[in-house]
Image: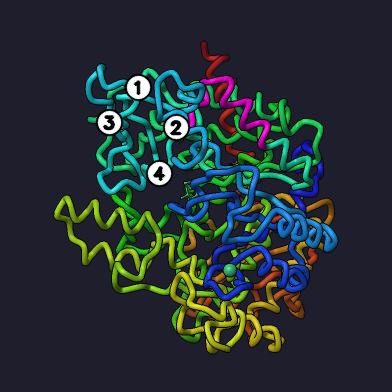
């Protein structure tokens, strides 16, 4: 364990709620806060420690709440501030903390600041946003994630200037260079901290600082996923100054945590954000794991070669190595911006769905990082796989479709790819039971419900001892009772094995061994070290256990945990790495001698 201290946010499990799709209380087809309140006991039954709530502030919903028009109020469709207070208290009464979503790279164009700003260059709020005066000619090209034209600058007549929007044209980017903008944001944060919320998940936080010399990068930008985008779109020169200032002005003095959505972040810069004595942020999540299995260029296009487990192990191991030094990591396999976890990384076809969902849970709950689960993961919900554009509600999919249409690109292929990667796959309403509309609403759901709800639902899983849901509850409990699963060092074995992911977690004199079969094949697997002949696994997601000598016969997607065992004498990757560093140092010394 690093020297950094123990903390509640390192020890807890985060559960993400997408309010629009969780539970509708009034039959308008849209999930709401009273709906969440009605499920508080369910949340408690999961054993989770923190809820990350997607945005619930005032919003015209161009991007489902990520376009905020009032930071001090609750979206009408979701309820009132009184409802929010009841929710917060209900969570706290159950010892669950609440992390809000902080969206401060941009506001809605319906926010009063922008409404003022767009009136005149003399407006007190003009400088709250980024403008390009028309007399300077065409603005330097910037790609917009959500704009059907692909252009992030939109002309505004009254100011005779273009405003910047990295996302949709209804989401103008805030200008953090302006002290007044920053102070207004800190004020918002203090308001919610004073209300008692326990932290923020920070949306698109790497975007807040831009290179405002606005270099012309047209040649660099082939697509929005071009690997160089991070340097000129985001991660600007003042990013860390702002984060430091934000910490000082808001976080200090409150027992809260922060979780940064750190798109474009590389391993080398991770500690700049979360190294504890830098006093910026507490945790972050990266996209390196998420992008595996997609092609490098273009929208999220599944790579026909599929998932390479060796690469996956490499990514998660490298990130562990960083946070072993300092700071703290998180781990997730899906959220509201991603398809369903079991469809993406496991196997949602028939017989393998349950076992692979449990295997993925075992992975998330045994790594050295705060695990983040997305609502529905705990019952193994799957991708809906829409086959026509009319079914989608997500602005990202809809506008990308329009964009590709304008470029005369292959729309059929796009729709097919979206069945794997579209965000709406993860946003379909929660499947509570087998009654009409999965018990989510008595009205017409805002987004179609997956037909499999008649068998795949929380009620059915609740009354089945061997369900994914029960497995989740048991695994969450296990993590709580085994400090080695939280703070223990992680050590990888057999890093080149293409189907099996094996690692240990060791704290003091105790070790747990985790063996995960990520494939649908039965595998004969030679353990890296000998176990007692009569050993029984501590956790097993299947009914079979077959160990002969050193050889494990693993079922498809089988997940096993052994232990507590005494620390292994057979070195894993950590020891090899330490040895390598030592050798490198020795050869350095000998070079020095030679000189
Ligand atoms: C983040 C959110 C995503 C949203 C975008 C713009 O990536 O997670 O849902 O669309 O920011 O706010
Ligand atoms: Ca509702």
Callout 3: 10 Å neighbours few (<14), some, many (20+)? some
Residue 562 appears in view:
no
Q: Secondary structure at mark 2?
A: loop
> Where is residue 242 shown, x and y percent of the image?
59, 25
Q: CA distance from mark 3 to mark 1?
A: 9 Å
Q: Secondary structure at mark 1?
A: loop
Q: CA distance from mark 1 to mark 2?
A: 12 Å
Marks 1/2 in contact by CB < 8 Å: the verdict is no
Residue 290 in magenta? Answer: no
Split into 4 quadrants, where in the image is the N terminus?
A: top right
Q: CA distance from mark 3 to mark 4?
A: 18 Å
First of labels 3, 2 by sequence position = 3
Q: Secondary structure at mark 3?
A: loop
Image quarter of residue 71: top right
Callout 2: 10 Å neighbours few (<14), some, many (20+)? many
Q: CA distance from mark 1 to mark 4?
A: 21 Å
> Is 551 drawn above or below residue 487 in the view shown?
below
- The mark closer to the camera, 1 or 2, is 1
> Where is residue 587 shown, x and y percent of the image?
55, 26
> Where is residue 63 shown, x and y percent of the image?
45, 52
- The mark closer to the camera, 2 or 4, is 4
- To which residue does mark 4 refer? 170
> Is 159 drawn above or below residue 560 in the view shown?
above
Callout 1: 10 Å neighbours few (<14), some, many (20+)? some
- To which residue does mark 2 refer? 234
Residue 83 appears in view:
yes
Q: CA distance from mark 3 to mark 2?
A: 14 Å
**Does the magenta stretch mainly form a helix, a strand or a loop?**
helix
- To which residue does mark 1 refer? 214
First of labels 3, 4 by sequence position = 3
Marks 2/4 in contact by CB < 8 Å: the verdict is no
Marks 3/4 in contact by CB < 8 Å: the verdict is no
């Amino acid at each position: 364990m690093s020297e950094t201290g123990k903390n509640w946010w390192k020890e807890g499990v985060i559960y993400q709620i997408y309010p629009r799709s969780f539970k509708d209380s009034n039959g308008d087809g849209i999930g709401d806060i009273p709906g969440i309140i009605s499920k508080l006991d369910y949340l408690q039954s999961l054993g989770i420690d923190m809820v990350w709530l997607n945005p619930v502030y005032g919003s015209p919903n161009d991007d489902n709440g990520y376009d905020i028009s009032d930071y001090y109020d609750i979206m009408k469709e979701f309820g009132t501030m009184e409802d929010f207070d009841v929710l917060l208290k209900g969570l706290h009464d159950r010892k669950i903390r609440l992390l809000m979503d902080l969206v401060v790279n941009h506001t809605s164009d319906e926010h009063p600041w922008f409404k003022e700003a767009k009136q005149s260059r003399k407006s007190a709020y003009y400088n709250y946003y980024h403008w390009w005066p028309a007399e300077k000619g065409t603005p330097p090209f910037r790609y917009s994630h959500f704009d059907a034209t692909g252009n992030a600058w939109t002309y505004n007549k009254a100011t005779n200037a273009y405003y910047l929007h990295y996302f949709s044209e209804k989401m103008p980017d805030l200008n953090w260079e302006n002290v007044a903008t920053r102070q207004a944001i800190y004020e918002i944060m203090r308001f919610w901290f004073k209300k008692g919320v326990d932290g923020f998940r920070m949306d698109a936080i790497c975007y807040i600082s831009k290179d405002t010399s606005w270099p012309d990068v047209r040649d660099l930008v082939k697509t929005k996923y071009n690997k160089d985008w991070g340097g000129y779109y985001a991660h600007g020169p003042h990013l860390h100054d702002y984060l430091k200032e934000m910490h000082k002005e808001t976080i200090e003095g409150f027992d809260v945590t922060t979780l940064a959505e750190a798109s474009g972040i590389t391993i080398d810069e991770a500690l700049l954000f979360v190294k504890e004595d830098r006093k910026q942020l507490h945790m972050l999540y990266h996209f390196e794991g998420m992008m595996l299995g997609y092609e490098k260029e273009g929208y999220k296009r599944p790579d026909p070669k599929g998932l390479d487990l060796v690469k996956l192990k490499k990514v998660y191991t490298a990130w562990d190595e960083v946070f072993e030094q300092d700071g703290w990591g998180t781990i997730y396999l899906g959220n509201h911006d991603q398809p369903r976890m079991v469809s993406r990384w496991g196997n949602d076809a028939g017989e393998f769905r349950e076992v692979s969902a449990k295997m993925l849970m075992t992975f998330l709950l045994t790594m050295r990082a705060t695990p983040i689960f997305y609502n529905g993961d705990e019952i193994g919900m799957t991708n809906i796989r829409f086959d026509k554009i009319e079914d989608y509600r997500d602005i990202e999919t809809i506008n990308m479709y329009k964009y590709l249409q304008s470029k005369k690109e292959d729309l059929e292929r796009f729709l097919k790819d979206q069945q794997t990667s579209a965000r709406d796959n993860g946003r379909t309403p929660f499947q509570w039971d087998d009654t009409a509309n999965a018990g989510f609403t008595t009205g017409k759901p805002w987004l179609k419900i997956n037909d499999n709800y008649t068998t795949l639902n929380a009620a059915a899983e609740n009354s089945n001892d061997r369900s994914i849901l029960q497995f989740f509850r048991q695994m969450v409990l296990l993590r709580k009772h085994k400090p080695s699963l939280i703070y223990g060092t992680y050590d990888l074995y057999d890093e080149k094995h293409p189907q099996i992911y094996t690692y240990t977690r060791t704290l003091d004199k105790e070790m747990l061994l985790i063996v995960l079969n990520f494939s649908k094949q039965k595998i004969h697997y030679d353990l890296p070290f000998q176990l007692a002949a009569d050993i029984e696994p501590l956790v097993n997601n299947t009914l079979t256990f077959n160990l002969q000598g050193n050889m494990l016969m693993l079922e498809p997607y089988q997940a096993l945990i052994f232990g507590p065992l005494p620390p292994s004498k057979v070195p894993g990757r950590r020891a090899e790495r330490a040895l390598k560093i030592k050798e490198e140092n020795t050869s350095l010394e000998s070079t020095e001698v030679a000189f």
